[in-house]
Image: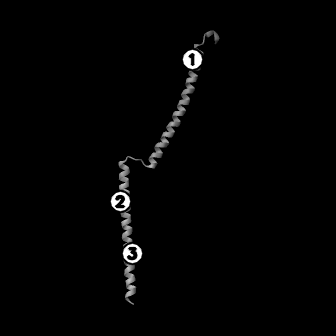
């Protein structure tokens, strides 16, 4: 009966070692897969989400600025047309 506890101790030690080895192997496989996925994504010229969001925000701001500029240009053209009409009217109507 003295051999039985030692057997369980050896079995527990073996299980612990196997678990540690499996954990290490899992981390190694995870690292390898992540590295390969990063290489593939890089070769496809894909962008990361944060970069995409930043460019999208810049485009949105540029679109708003363009709309404001177009609105301002329309106002200025209208004022110029009014001024030209005032200047080209016969002097008797002034």
Q: CA distance from mark 2 to mark 1?
A: 73 Å
How many residues crowd mark 2 within 10 Å: few (<14), some (14–19), many (20+)?
A: few
Q: Position of residue 50 (x, y in %)?
A: 46, 49
Relative to residue 86, is residue 74 depicted above or below? below
13 or 86, nearer to the observer: 13
How many residues crowd mark 1 within 10 Å: few (<14), some (14–19), many (20+)?
A: few
Q: Secondary structure at mark 2?
A: helix
Q: CA distance from mark 2 to mark 3?
A: 24 Å
Q: Which mark is on residue 2?
A: none
Nearest to N terminus: mark 1 or mark 3: 3
Question: Can you name the residue that lies furthest to the top here?
Answer: 92
Q: Position of residue 93 (x, y in %)?
A: 64, 11
Relative to residue 4, is residue 63 depicted above or below? above
Quadrant containing the C terminus in the rendered view:
top right
37 or 79, nearer to the observer: 37
**Residue at image location 36% in from the left, 62% down from the top:** 29
Nearest to N terminus: mark 2 or mark 3: 3
Residue tagged by mark 2?
32
Q: Position of residue 15 (x, y in %)?
A: 39, 76
Q: Secondary structure at mark 1?
A: helix
How many residues crowd mark 3 within 10 Å: few (<14), some (14–19), many (20+)?
A: few
Residue tagged by mark 3?
16
- The mark closer to the camera, 1 or 3, is 3
Q: Secondary structure at mark 3?
A: helix
**Residue at image location 38% in from the left, 85% down from the top:** 6
């Amino acid at each position: 009966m003295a051999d039985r506890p030692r057997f369980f101790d050896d079995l527990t030690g073996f299980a612990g070692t196997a678990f540690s080895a499996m954990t290490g192997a899992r981390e190694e496989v995870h690292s390898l897969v992540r590295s390969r996925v990063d290489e593939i994504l890089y070769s496809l010229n894909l962008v990361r989400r944060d970069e995409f969001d930043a460019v999208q925000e810049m485009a949105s701001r540029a679109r708003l600025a363009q709309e404001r500029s177009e609105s301002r240009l329309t106002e200025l053209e209208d004022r110029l047309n009014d001024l030209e009409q005032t200047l080209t009217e016969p002097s008797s109507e002034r």
